[in-house]
Amino acid sequence: MKGSVGPVLAILAVLVAVWYAAAVPMNVKEVLTQAERDGAVIEPGSAAERRDVGRWALVFSNVENLGATWSSERSRLPAPHQVVAELWKSTWVEETTGRRGIVRSGSLSNRSLVYHGGVTLGATALGFVIGALAGVLLAVGIVYSRVMDMSVMPWAIISQTIPIVALAPMIIVVLYSIGLPGLFAKAVISAYLSFFPVVVGMVKGLRAPDHMQLDLMRTYSASKSDTFWKLRLPASVPYLFASLKIGIAASLVGAIVGELPVQRGGLGARMLGGSYYGQTEQIWAALFVAALMAAFLVWFIGWLERRTLRAMGVQA
Amino acid sequence: MKCVTARSLDLTFQTNDGPVHALKDVNLEIGKGEFVSFIGPSGCGKTTFLRCIAGLEQPTGGEISVNGMTPDAARKARAYGYVFQAAGLYPWRTIGGNIKLPLEIMGFSKAEQNARVTRVLELVDLAGFEKKFPWQLSGGMQQRASIARALAFDADILLMDEPFGALDEIVRDHLNEQLLALWARTEKTIGFVTHSIPEAVYLSTKIVVMSPRPGRITDVIDSPLPKERPLDIRDSPEFIEIAHRVRDGLRAGHIDE
């Protein structure tokens, strides 16, 4: 662990540097327009002329007027420190000092990423539980029934070829019209994405015991349920956790996609709202919260995996 | 009383390359308390024959009975314990837990399970290893644990399919000695598949020499060696003579290829 800190920081530094570098040409046009209004001499002289000039060419011909590319209020690509500031503002500052923050109103502010992150986390968790359970049950059916193996697996694969963005509004409309709450609709979309890796991993895991181990069970005249509970299920545990890690990340994506058309809170709603109103910092801040949440969720599954395997006595 | 009786046993596997004669006209009787080794090159059907006794393969012709029953009925009556080439211990169970596996399936009480685990671990010289996990044991110890697992439910017959094939020579010698001691103490009937001539001669009261394509018995040798067998019996003239006869039998099986 100790030796890996250096390389990790180095990669992080490179990413941040690339980001800062990219922010300059990305924001150059708007910044130059503003500078021109403020009376600076820009080359070429008018916004109409600049439209046909490449971003890099503008950067090199106006080096002395680029100062604002890392601090512009309406940037195309906000600089890292702007995103961090937005993150801080929309979490801690909003909750502690905002009119609707938890300190002054007693409930989480609907302008804070803590609130929206919580909304997304709830849908993710519910969707993940539904998806993982459905995945495990389908895998058991597929392993034990040839009919299910032939009939369910192709549909499971086809289901993953449909873009979720196309399917999500339909799921929401259908579930809303039969009176189910928005949380459930988002969870269904989230489950739709997470069940598949669990099915694939569990089928592989339940089929992991080799001929010899199955023959051994036969020499004991073991029943199907004995073979399942004492051999197939424990043998599938490492496979299950590998797919759960993929599944929970997919669940988060599903929940966010489900929040795009619903627009009743959540990180997806913040991202779409940010793009409506040109608030790129808001988009990036929500994106970072989503990424941090995904990292935490995957870490959490890994932690469960380590604990479970240790309890099962498997060499860590 | 005869433990295993096979009469003109035939087994043909249907494969994509056409039928394979795994066993052809196999006749054999194994008496109670005998130690019978099956030796022969790969494909001679020695493992297939052992699996027929266990009811893991269905013969396509002839008859086989185990303790006077069909192999399937014998298996349900817990007539045998089977030891595979690999120990096949479950990594998520302790040694004690692995030995309890058949006992749980067969419905022994908790107290009985614990008593039996202690007893069979002593039999294979692994007393005190009950709480260890398989990865904490050497290969030879794992195989002993798998023998303990096969002994745990008091089957009369112990079927062993090249149980020491993956172990080195020194460990193997040691385990052979222990197996003989175990056999003397428990008076089980043992069917033992092996590739090794010295192993077969050292262990057995009866050596069945087999040859391939089709799998058949070419010689059955009743060993004149005494029941008490120190390791250096392998240098005695009787031992060398039997080993010679086994080797001749194996060679005869190869000539007609």
Image: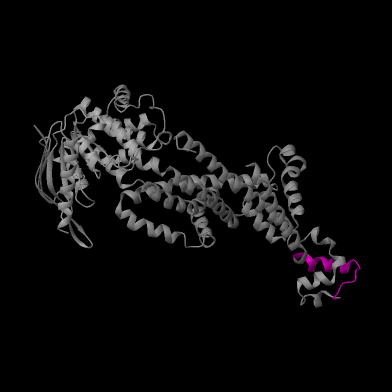
Who is closer to the viewer here, B175 or B170? B170
Q: Quadrant of the N terminus of chain A?
A: top right
Residue A99 placement: quadrant = top right
Above or below residue A6? Residue B185 is above
Residue B197 on image: x %, y %: 23, 43
Q: Indicate whether residue A132 is drawn in magenta.
A: no
Where residue A69 appears, as percent x and y from the top left, is 80, 62
Q: Residue at x 43, y 50 (%)?
A: A201
Residue at horizontal 23%, vertical 35%? B235
Provide the major secondary structure of the magenta segment. Answer: helix
Q: Give above or below for A36 relative to B54.
A: below
Q: Position of residue B67 (x, y in %)?
A: 12, 34
Q: State whether residue A212 is above or below residue B233.
A: below
Q: Is residue A255 visible?
A: yes
Residue B105 appears in view: no
Q: Residue at x 53, y 59 (%)?
A: A169
> Between residues B218 and A138, which one lies in front from this camera angle?
B218
Q: Is residue A151 left or right of residue B252?
A: right
Q: How many numbered marks does the figure carry?
A: 0
* Foreground of the two, B91 or A239: B91
Q: Is residue A153 left or right of residue A86?
A: left
Range of residues picked out in magenta: A26-44
Q: In this view, which residue lies farthest toward the right?
A: A39
- The image quarter containing residue A213 is top left
Residue B90: x and y in percent read 37, 38
